[in-house]
Image (tube, grey):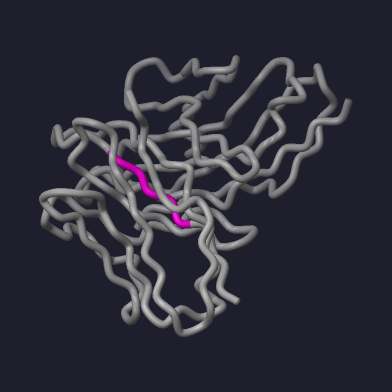
Amino acid sequence: NAGVMQNPRHLVRRRGQEARLRCSPMKGHSHVYWYRQLPEEGLKFMVYLQKENIIDESGMPKERFSAEFPKEGPSILRIQQVVRGDSAAYFCASSPGTGRISEAFFGQGTRLTVV
Amino acid sequence: AQSVTQPDIHITVSEGASLELRCNYSYGATPYLFWYVQSPGQGLQLLLKYFSGDTLVQGIKGFEAEFKRSQSSFNLRKPSVHWSDAAEYFCAVVDDKAAGNKLTFGGGTRVLVKP
């Protein structure tokens, strides 16, 4: 029973490039959440998606960041024209779509370094 | 909006000694509370959760937490720490009025275990 899978684990990008982070939720889970952890800080919510729908993107920066969760395949967090301040660990979590509060399971994270 | 405060940024404890990590939340309704642990370079693992019922909650790895509504607290405890407990610990709350299981995290407490 594979957990939440994120790849790559580590990603290095030069300023101005694009970063694509992928997340495959646990089997049977239809809800995906992305969080960002800046150095020496806690996790901050970015976006909540269900299949083909963005439910809550209140934590997403207004520019350069986007997320999707297509009908088939993993959820993607895309950061265009990366800057040094985007360097952080990005975590994906998933939960079942039961409509009730439940535990969220986290992936190992993608550590993005912008040089 | 809800918030979570972890007053202690760092705690150093000797192996075999007891540990208590503080967590205070600000939330109007009954909160759904979680404690997660993050080992260096890893993702988050759920230690325990409180949804309702008994206010003393048992978790994995010998941890427990007590929900105290009057103090808006959900402190984590372990009677005797092991060197492997050195990690960062995050308290979190779910807003049941928001869609899904969106977590608001505290800033974290980093635990160092002395031999």
State the residue at coordinates (26%, 64%).
Answer: A67
From the viewer's perspective, is B115 left or right of A93? Answer: right
Horizontal and vertical percent for residue B32? 35, 35
State the residue at coordinates (55%, 19%).
Answer: B64
From the viewer's perspective, is B113 left or right of B50? Answer: right
State the residue at coordinates (51%, 72%).
Answer: A13
Q: Specify whether residue A20 is painted magenta.
A: no
Q: Is residue A27 above or below residue B54?
A: below
From the viewer's perspective, is B79 left or right of B37? Answer: right
Figure quadrant of residue B51: top left
Q: Is residue A67 above or below residue A95?
A: below
Which is the main secondary structure of the residues drawn in magenta?
Answer: strand
Horizontal and vertical percent for residue B28? 33, 46
Q: How many marks?
A: 0
Horizontal and vertical percent for residue B81? 73, 21
Name the one closer to the observer, A71 or A62. A71
Which image quarter holds the C terminus of chain B? top right
Which image quarter holds the N terminus of chain B? bottom left
Residue furthest right in the image: B115
Q: Specify whether residue A93 is painted magenta.
A: yes
Q: Is residue B113 above or below residue B108?
A: above
State the residue at coordinates (21%, 35%).
Answer: A29
Instruction: Magenta stretch: give its range.
Output: A90-94
Horizontal and vertical percent for residue A23? 33, 49
Name the one closer to the observer, B33 or A26. A26
